[in-house]
């Protein structure tokens, strides 16, 4: 395992008026690992993602990606640096086809110079090929020409991940990819994530404990906007603070 | 420019500004609650003026003004009930086009009923003449209009911010679905809000008749300024609309005195500067 | 593609047999303007209520150039297109800062501002009376020049210009921009998240549309020998919106159908009754309440109902796409 973390947050803080949604979160993600973030509802996990991916500006603290300070960069800069995310609520392009969804994400990072825009979209063989590969990878090849809004919930979650993959990132932020999925679809998604874990560094928000415990290299636990524990699955499972946060009691 | 002229210019600006604030408040309410720019807002203002013109012959000026308020408010309710309501689940661009179509129909209606020629109108005798303010002599009617519209605007603001019904309106603006889920008859709130916004526009038109006269295109002429006020003032912000209205009125009046051809342009320049400097508007949040 | 092109040629040839050449020419001119609006509304999801700004500015520019400098045809076409693009670039930069409802009001507001300027600056524009004395410069140079003085000749020229514009628009829409614009319409947040500077692309769409609209404006300036003030008025802005609406949004051919239907209607009705805006208003209200999606989508729905479900092709081919624009609502 190489020394430098691929992602590091330092004392990341986010206030919404009087509400401190994220409070001084410092975590590091080692490259090539699958790092999960868990915690009860409202613990600030998605807000943390939003701070990292630029959807929200932090009130305080820094985010560094591959050693480079990316704090407060607008979201559209990050895929070009190698960081892509998917969203908790399905956030694809509803009236575009599955293929176009992937295509547009691929094209963003393969963007040609200004003259490239004089060519027809269908002429970009490399972009087309990469889009097809991405669609196949998330198991939607058979739905390639279907409009995204016609997909089932499970298929839409797969597309949700696919669009993020299409940016060919080095770090993938996955926000509850199995959200709302039935058991069989959940298994598919889990297998997909495990498959991806070898090739991408993944930061995963997930509620389903069995999945988290079985596939994560490292787990960070959040509660009330703070990082309350971190470690391997075994370490976290045995951690009293974690049990307390999940099972009851208020601070 | 001497002091007397300056005072007159500023007073003119406040009169117009109060009118703009009134228009902005009505438009803002409709915009905030219904998420649509009401392209018919201008023609509702015009209709109020024309109703006053006709009704005042039978009922006197005050009666005519009340008739204008009621007639246009009722029309607003009808528009909401028959037209706008059907489009809530469809996105607001269609509602906008509906109001645009209505503005065409109503403007043509005005021409058909009252003819295409402009009409002048004298203020009621009791309010005619000038008032000596020391620094200048100013038309009594305009002062009265300024005070009355200010009272209307203030009343509106207090109603929306201090009363229970106003709280309901604000809740509907914040989150339409939640408000409905809380058992508030949101449909009735919408109809009444639209009617109120329309009524304010109509009343504004009626009150301004002795100042500005009547012209079938008066609705279209004032609409962009109402838009500027809302955009400049900030999303759905009533205080913002008031402030912006006054600002626009005064700036326009000053420019008319300094360099008349630039008066209208200056309003848009002001809006542009506002948008660039503060994208959320003077008092808007985001 | 070939079918579409053949259809266009057929329409070009047949149209002057159905309506007067002058009206037919207007149809193609407004078809260009409607296509431009379709680019920003149908494809990118931004409803502009002020396209007459660019139409009118280009028309006045062309008119003034022809009157004072005896400018040639290519010169005014280029100049008008550039003026449309430049004005759109400047205004677009401001308008893009807001979305949805506010964007609409801004475009409308700026349109009105230019109208007021044109109205008051009578020494330049002729104000309410319009700018008279516009010649029709010949096409070509020296011995190869063709005079365009009859309505039929001008119609042929306008139709040719339209074909050029149509081809250019098709290239834009078939290029990656077509998919990117649609992605922005569908989900601007995600478009940003996958790496697009959404504001910049919106600005680009707006500027391109301004160029096309300016081109149309130049063609219009030479229609009647006069540039009337209507050329920059909200009426034309509304007309263009209406054309796109009745023709069907997000589809390359829809605006053409819309322009044709609209102009034909306005021509026939206004002969009978001069209160045409009233009919337009009524028609608009009816379409909005009962016939959303326009005629083209109505036909598409009809086909689908019969059982013909087309599959969607790869990016780059144009397909009817119903529209959702982005919202900015509430305080």
Image (cartoon, rainbow, N blue to C red):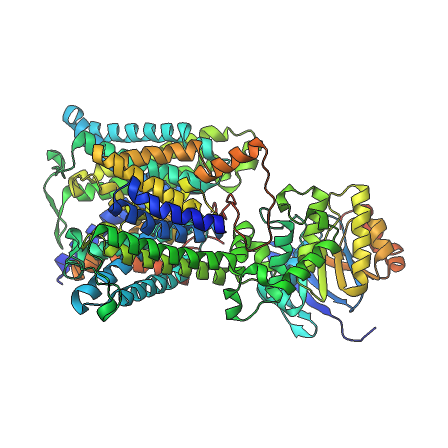
Asked if residue C4 shows in the view, the reply is yes
Residue B135 % position (x, y): 13, 55
Asked if residue B24 shows in the view, the reply is no
Taking the view exactly as shown, the residue that stands out farthest to the front is C143
Quadrant for residue C207, please give it: bottom left
Q: Residue at 76% across / 64% down in the picture?
A: A200
Residue C121 % position (x, y): 18, 59
**Please, is residue C229 above or below residue A111 in the view?**
above
Q: How many numbered markers are drawn?
A: 0
Q: Work out whether residue C108 or residue A13 is closer to the camera in this orientation and state it.
A: C108
Quadrant for the N terminus of chain B in the image:
bottom left
Residue A219 % position (x, y): 81, 59
Q: Work out whether residue A15 or residue A177 is closer to the camera in this orientation and state it.
A: A177
Judge from the rendering whether residue A71 lies leftward or rightward of residue A119; answer left or right.
right
**Please, is residue C277 above or below residue A193 in the view?**
above
Taking the view exactly as shown, the residue that stands out farthest to the top is B58
Q: Work out whether residue C291 or residue B77 is closer to the camera in this orientation and state it.
A: C291
Residue B82 % position (x, y): 40, 27
Q: Work out whether residue A236 or residue B107 is closer to the camera in this orientation and state it.
A: B107
**Please, is residue A177 above or below residue C92 in the view?**
above
């Amino acid at each position: 395992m190489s020394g430098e973390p691929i992602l590091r947050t330092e004392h990341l803080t986010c206030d919404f008026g009087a509400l401190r949604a994220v409070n001084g979160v410092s975590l590091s993600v080692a490259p090539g690992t699958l790092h999960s973030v868990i915690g009860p509802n409202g613990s600030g996990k998605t807000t943390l993602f939003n701070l990292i991916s630029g959807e929200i500006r932090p009130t305080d603290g820094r985010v560094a990606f591959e050693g480079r300070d990316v704090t407060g960069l607008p979201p559209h800069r990050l895929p070009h640096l190698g960081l892509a995310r998917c969203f908790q609520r399905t956030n694809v392009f509803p009236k575009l086809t599955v293929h176009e969804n992937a295509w547009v994400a691929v094209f963003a990072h393969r963007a040609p110079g200004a003259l490239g825009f004089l060519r027809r979209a269908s002429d970009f063989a490399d972009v087309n090929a990469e889009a097809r590969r991405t669609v196949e990878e998330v198991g939607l090849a058979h739905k390639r020409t279907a409009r995204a809004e016609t997909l089932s919930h499970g298929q839409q979650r797969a597309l949700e991940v696919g669009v993020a993959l299409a940016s060919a990132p080095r770090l993938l932020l996955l926000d509850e990819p199995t959200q709302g999925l039935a058991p069989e679809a959940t298994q598919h998604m889990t297998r997909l994530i495990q498959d991806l874990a070898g090739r991408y560094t993944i930061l995963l928000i997930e509620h389903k404990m069995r999945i988290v415990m079985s596939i994560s290299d490292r787990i960070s636990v959040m509660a009330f906007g703070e990082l309350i524990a971190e470690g391997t699955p075994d370490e976290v499972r045995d951690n009293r603070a974690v049990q307390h946060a999940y099972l009851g009691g208020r601070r | 420019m001497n002091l007397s002229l300056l005072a007159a210019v500023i007073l003119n600006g406040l009169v117009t500004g109060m009118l703009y604030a009134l228009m902005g408040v009505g438009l803002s309410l409709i915009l905030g609650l219904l998420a649509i720019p009401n392209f018919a807002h201008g023609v509702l203002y015009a209709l109020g003026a024309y109703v006053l013109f006709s009704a005042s012959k039978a009922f006197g000026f005050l009666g005519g003004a009340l008739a204008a308020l009621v007639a246009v408010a009722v029309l607003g309710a009808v528009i909401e009930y028959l037209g706008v309501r059907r489009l809530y689940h469809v996105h607001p661009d269609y509602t906008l086009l509906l109001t645009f179509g209505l503005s065409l129909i109503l403007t043509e209606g005005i021409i058909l009923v009252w003819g295409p020629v402009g009409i002048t109108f004298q203020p009621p005798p009791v309010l005619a003449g000038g008032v000596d303010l020391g620094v200048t002599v100013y038309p009594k009617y305009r002062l009265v209009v300024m005070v009355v519209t200010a009272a209307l605007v203030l009343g509106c603001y207090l109603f929306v911010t201090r009363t229970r019904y106003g709280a309901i309106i604000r809740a509907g603006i914040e989150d339409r679905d939640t408000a409905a889920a809380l058992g508030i008859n949101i449909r009735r709130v919408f109809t009444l809000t639209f009617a109120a916004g329309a009524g304010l526009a109509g009343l504004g038109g009626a009150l301004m008749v002795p100042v500005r006269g009547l012209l079938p295109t008066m609705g279209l002429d004032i609409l962009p300024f109402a838009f500027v006020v809302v955009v400049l003032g900030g999303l759905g912000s009533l205080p913002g609309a008031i402030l912006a209205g006054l600002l626009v009125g005064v700036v326009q009046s000053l420019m008319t005195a300094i360099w008349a051809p630039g008066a209208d342009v200056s309003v848009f320049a002001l809006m542009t500067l506002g948008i660039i400097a503060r994208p959320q508007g003077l008092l808007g949040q985001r | 593609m070939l079918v579409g092109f053949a259809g266009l040629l057929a329409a070009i040839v047949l149209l002057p047999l159905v309506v007067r050449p002058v009206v037919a020419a207007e149809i193609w001119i407004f078809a260009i303007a409607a296509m431009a609006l379709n680019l920003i509304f149908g494809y990118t999801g931004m409803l502009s209520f002020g396209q007459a700004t660019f139409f009118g500015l280009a028309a006045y520019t062309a008119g003034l150039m022809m009157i004072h400098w005896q400018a040639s045809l290519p010169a005014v076409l280029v100049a008008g297109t550039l003026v449309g693009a430049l004005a759109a670039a400047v205004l677009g930069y401001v308008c893009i800062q807001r979305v949805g409802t506010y964007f609409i009001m801004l475009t409308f507001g700026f349109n009105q501002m230019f109208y007021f300027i044109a109205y008051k600056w009578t020494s330049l524009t002729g104000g309410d009376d319009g700018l008279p004395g516009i010649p029709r410069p010949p096409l070509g140079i020296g011995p190869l020049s063709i005079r365009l003085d009859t309505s039929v000749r001008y119609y042929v020229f306008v139709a040719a210009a339209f074909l050029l514009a149509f081809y250019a628009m098709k290239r834009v829409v078939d290029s990656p921009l077509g998919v990117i614009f649609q992605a922005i319409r569908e989900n601007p947040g995600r478009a940003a998240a996958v790496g697009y500077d959404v504001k910049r692309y919106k600005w680009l769409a707006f500027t391109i549309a301004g160029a096309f609209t300016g081109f149309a404006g130049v063609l219009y300036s030479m229609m009647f020998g006069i540039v009337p003030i209507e050329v920059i008025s909200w009426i034309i802005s509304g007309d263009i919106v209406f054309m796109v609406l009745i023709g069907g949004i997000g589809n390359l051919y829809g605006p053409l159908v819309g322009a044709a239907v609209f102009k034909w209607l306005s021509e026939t009705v206004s002969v009978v009754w001069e209160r045409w805006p009233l009919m337009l208003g009524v028609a608009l209200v009816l379409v909005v309440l009962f016939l959303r999606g326009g005629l083209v989508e109505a036909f598409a729905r009809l086909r689908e109902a019969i059982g013909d479900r087309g599959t969607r092709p790869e990016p780059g081919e144009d397909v009817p796409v119903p529209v959702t624009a982005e919202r900015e609502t509430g305080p």
